[in-house]
Image: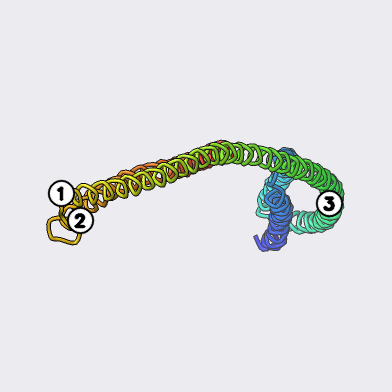
Amino acid sequence: MGGITPLVTSALPLAGSVINTVRSTSNNSNNAAAQQAAAQAAAELEYKRQQDAQKAQQQAAALEYQKQKDAEAAAAAAAAREYQRQQDEAKAAAAAQSLDYQRQQDAARLAAEQAALDRKYSEDRTASERAAAADAAARQQQAQMAAEAQAREWARQDQLRQQDAELQRQRDEAARVAAEQARAREMDSYRSSQEQTLAQLRASQEAAYQAQDKEAQAQLAQLTAAADAAEKRRVEALRQNVGKTRASLGARGVAAGDGSGEAILLGLTKDTQTERQNAQAVDQLKQQAIQQNLDAIKRRNLLEQTQLADRQKLEFMSKYF
């Protein structure tokens, strides 16, 4: 039993070294996957980047699965070797119980074999570590080169998209400016047409008003002339009536300065004044009617102009706003 204990003691570090190798390989794989995932998360801006990142993730998963399979195979081989070693130790222990000499010989042989196995395990572990490191470095370099190429392609596509967007913006801006200019010209033309229509209305109204004003002035002149003629007739009739009345009064022996004669003459004068006032009142009413007609024409013209301006304003607003 004393010869078996060193063999077991020397085998435990070997198993721990194998487990540490598997764990180190797994940690390296996890670090590579984390870097790949970080690269994927940074490239999720567009659909093409997501597809490329998904493809890279699938490749990384395949590599990780292969590495796990290799690690499991290595662990199985180590377990098999450990089992064989334990069997050898059991045989050695059985032999040591029967023959101490044989035990010593077997222990020496097992020690030599164990030393050889340790060297072989160490060499295999070193070679595996170097191969894994070289493979990881190659994969990392390849992934970096692919990421750089993809980044350059994305940058080129972004630049092309920016150029297209700028060209489209310039075309839209030119179209907008042209549309605004055309709209401004159309608005000016429409406004000029409306102003011309309003000016034509004002001109026609002014011409009609001037004609009506001339007619009214002619009517006023006729009224004035008729009033003057009527006044002359009244004065002449009053003079004739006064002469006739004085002659009649003188023939009857009544003086014009007497109370009755003077009353008769005053009556004639009063009748003439009443007739004059009535005629003036009628003439004034006729003049007021003529002036009211002119004022009504002015108000109607102003109302028509205001209505036309308001209607044009509404039409302009509804057409362009």
Q: Position of residue 235 (x, y in %)?
A: 34, 49
Sequence-first tag of 1 and 2 = 1
Cα–Cα span, label 1 and label 2 = 18 Å
Q: Amino acid at mark 3?
A: Gln
Kindly tell me whether residue 237 is visible in this rendering.
yes
Q: Which numbered disc, 1 or 3, marks the residue closer to the eye? A: 1
Give the residue number, with chain letter if any, for mark 2: 266
Give how far apart the Cα atoms at labels 1 and 3 are. 154 Å
Quadrant for the N terminus, please: bottom right
Colour pattern: rainbow
Residue at image x 20%, y 47%?
Answer: 248
What amino acid is found at the position of numbered circle 2 in the picture? Leu
- State the residue at coordinates (86%, 46%): 149
The residue depicted at 79 percent of the width and 46 percent of the height is: 166
Give the camera-side residue of 212 and 296: 212
Mark 1 secondary-structure assignment: loop
Which of the two labelled residues, at mark 2 and mark 3, occupies the earlier sequence position?
3
Quickly name the residue at label 3.
144
Tell me: 4 left or right of 318.
Answer: right
Residue 252: mark: 1
